Image (tube, grey):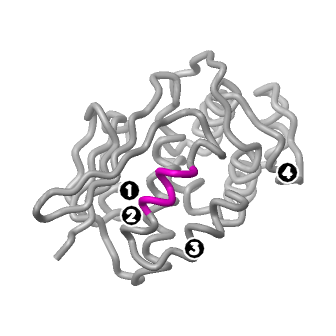
Amino acid sequence: MSEQPESNTTTIAAYGYAIASALERRDIDPSDVFSRAGVHLSSKTDPMVRLGSAEISRLFALAVEETRDPAFGLFVGDCLHPGNLHALGYALMSSDSLRDYCNRLVNYYRLISMGAGIRVEETDSDLLLITEVMSDVCHETQDAFVALHVRIMRFIYKPNFNPAWLNLKRPVPECGSQPYDNYFNCQISFSESQIVIAIDRT
């Protein structure tokens, strides 16, 4: 089961809506999971409504338990849509390049979540989207974050886009690395100090 840290950091409530949608797609009633987690289940995605990291962590812990899927965060990332991110999502979708995408994410991410700091660095070969994760953000939240952004990159750039390589802060889950290998189709390192999505500049 995932860690369930207490925190004052928040994210937009639409994230909880995505968890509910992912549970429904697995034929699990989200109202029961949300009730047990002590989180209000809303059908609205009002950008002014926010959930705490501890609430998200409780939701994910129960969702992983119900689905028996340690990689459930990847599935939630696939259920999130740019519209869930409100103005930021539409700005990201209008990016002219992956570099532009990364820079917009850096500039505006704090509007949707206070759980991480993001920056861009460049090497001779790669553009690096680096995420400093707060210690209280659960593994599944991190998985959903990376899955969502790689999926959007595939949409705005090309469907067969894969990162050059990927660093994840989370350890290898109980199910092993196969779901991650299948989704990202690149070299992945787990238990790293930062999340890094490397984009080939060539």
Kindly state the secondary structure of the residue where label 1 is placed.
helix
Q: Which residue is mark 1?
A: 179
Kindly state the secondary structure of the residue where label 3 is placed.
helix
Q: Which residue is mark 4?
A: 46
Front tag of 2 and 3: 3
Residue extending furthest toward the left: 124
Front residue (pair 89, 150)? 89
Front residue (pair 1, 43)? 43
Q: Which residue is mark 3?
A: 93
Q: Earlier in the sequence, mark 2 or mark 3?
A: 3
For the residues labelled 2 and 1, the Cα–Cα distance comes to 6 Å
Residue 23 spot, x, y in % from top left = 70, 51
What's drawn in magenta, residue-wise? Answer: 102-108
- The amino acid type found where label 2 is placed reads Tyr
- 95 to the left or right of 131: right
- The amino acid type found where label 1 is placed reads Pro
Q: Which residue is mark 2?
A: 183
